[in-house]
Image: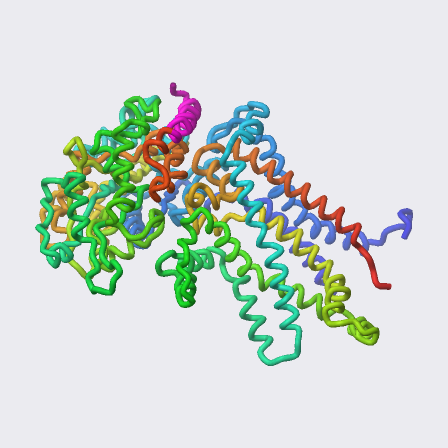
Amino acid sequence: MSMTMRRSRLHRKEHLAALLFVAIPVIGFLLFTLFPLLFSVYASFTNWNGISSPKFKGIDNYVKMFEDRYFLKSLWNTLYMMIGIPVGLAISLALALALNRKMRGTTFFRTVYYLPVISSIAAVAILWQWAFNGDFGLINQGLSLVGIDGPNWLQDTSTVKPALIIMAVWKGLGYSMLLYLAALQSVPRYLYEAASLDGASPWQQFRHITIPMVRPVTFFLIVTSIIGGSQIFVEINIMTPTGGPEFESASIVWYIWQKAFDNLQMGYASAMSVVLGLLVFIITFIQFRLNRRNQFSID
Amino acid sequence: MKKSRPMAATLAFVAAAGLMLGGCSAPTGAEAGEKKLTFMFRGGEDEKKAYEQAVSQFEKDNGVDVDIIVTTADQYTTKLKAAIAGKQVPDVFYIGPGDVQAYVQNGIVKDITEYVEKSDTIDLDNIWEYGVDSYRFDGKLTGQGAIYALPKDVGPFSFGYNKTMFEKAGIPLPDKDKPYTFDQFVDISKKLTADTNGDGSLDQWGTGLNVQWNLQPFVWSNGGDWLNEDRTKVTVDTPEFAETLQWFADLQNVHGVTPSVAEAQTLDTYQRWMKGEIGFFPIAPWDLSTYQKLGFDWDVIPYPAGKTGKPATWTGTLGIAVSENTQHPEDAVKLVEFLTANKEAQESLVKAGIQIPNLKDMAETWAADTTTKPANKAEFLEIVKDYGRALPGGNTYNAEWYDELFTNIQPVLDGKQTAKDYLKEAQPRMQQFLDAANQQAGIG
């Protein structure tokens, strides 16, 4: 279609309607994403308590950040808790493989594993808080059946992060499992047939057909999990409202929130959010670059 | 099909417009010229009911329309701050004593001294001084000067004991007028800590106290404190303070009179107390409704006292303030007074077992009735009138310095570090935070 072509009335009317539809997300983006984003960049260079007007003070907040041991600790904690991502992916792929077979009760199991995903994170966090209770908790009671004296999960500096990881893995399993399940079902059967004719073992089939074929899903899950994982907040705030023993479970977003709303340091909190945003951007960028190198197609 | 296109366009337009306007829609429903106030608060069901009733009474009496915004406890600060940032400050809202300084300096809350002193709705002499003073600020220090809010309640944090357990163990009941010394407290706690069913493991303990809410009474009564007089210096590295914290940690590590280690922040000891397995436990007004259902007899006593021989504890409070920019200051202040001192509202809150009366005369009548639990209600009034103090973190621009003490305290409670070493290490860090806070506030 050339631009010189005369547009019909119908075309113009449709164009208008289309523009209006397009306007909604665009206005939403400008108003609720771009503006707050730019504003927080500005706020990050100010001394602002969130209620008065901000006072400009240059890069002070950024300098302060790298001397702030709690900032560094919460950043480390957040990174540490991402150990759950590969673990979760491995388990959910295994589950998807299991549930991809023709056997009785798969629908039931799929529902069971998906339930945590649709449950409110706040409710789930409270449940797990009880489960992790050092004395009466379900987990320690279970462990005591096999003769293990379980720790006081959420109060012990060495177990609080693993406890949160366990919960996060459990909560995320259903979602990644579902995506893997869909990916597995779209792997062409003839690839397996050809491979088995060539004498490939089940492990070789898994290693050289299944894994590469579900790679796009793996990539998608890794990227979204890292972005999501770097923003972990609700479960931390509910299960360890003071940031855990010796600040061991404080995540970066939790720390930002605490500075902004508890300690009247909105400017400093904004600076930390900007740094977090940049880090997430850089990590995602690297992932996309790495993924491009691994891309291949089967035709 | 033909019709659907204009429809679609309209729909899109309406949705787009809705998006743009959604953020700044004014409260609707008011008739032109009618006076309208918004009241934002947080609280549980009982509180909501009592205040809704009081508000509708207020509307009737004064011909003012009041819009109520209720939030949950954890969402309140976030929502209020958002309202402030959006210049939509409610006319009347809750404020903690810790926020007074920042809110006054930024012109968010109104000085209501004149209105309140001239008022015929409220008699200031009949409201707890502690409650009113918590919301005074003279430009430098809180606790004195102009009034910026009235108390919604005062919450004396008291101590209590399981009477049934004492009687079973044949231990003389504590004297409500004479606090235990630290040593006596340890002795009795040791006697209460026992294996009552003979299965080889302890099932009853002397006490089990959360450090964050129970350290203050002991430190204060032992002559220590968090800050110096003008709140510019952190004084947690004094011998009195260290001695008290060590004693507190020793309850578990040396004397073994509390359940297992590291429970400082769980609900465990609370649950155990409710099951009747703990001898001594804190009791605050907001516990009263829950504790009525306990399966044992209990009463309130003063906290054990250290070197000074005088018991100490903290009194919490929440205030109701008026926005600096309200259109109807007189009515707004009147609403605050009404909520603070309205007899019916106070009665229903007290009956619900979540607070003690704000009105002195009503409180005296309430405390005089020793037939309902706890018998020693008078202790609560003693605390409010005499020996209760504000939580240390509530009197400064922010509580960062105060929280710092508790963030890394666990090794002390676990007996892995001495209190003295820890406090020596924590003091400079706390001081740094306090300096920053005071600088923000323009003090020191």
Q: How is the image coloured?
A: rainbow
Percent of width and height locating residue A295: 80, 55
Q: Nearer the viewer, residue B117 or B241?
A: B241
Q: Is residue A162 magenta?
A: no
Residue B222 as seen in the image, left or right of residue B404: left
Give the residue at the far top of this rendering. Answer: B444
Residue B123 visible within the image = no
Percent of width and height locating residue B443: 38, 20
Number of callouts in the render? 0
Q: Which residues are magenta?
A: B425-444
Magenta span: predominant SS is helix
Percent of width and height locating residue A119: 50, 62
Q: Residue at x 16, y 42 (%)?
A: B302
Residue A145 visible within the image = yes
Q: Quadrant of residue B271?
A: bottom left
Q: Is residue B430 magenta?
A: yes
Residue B57 as seen in the image, left or right of residue A14: left
Q: Residue at x 60, y 54 (%)?
A: A85
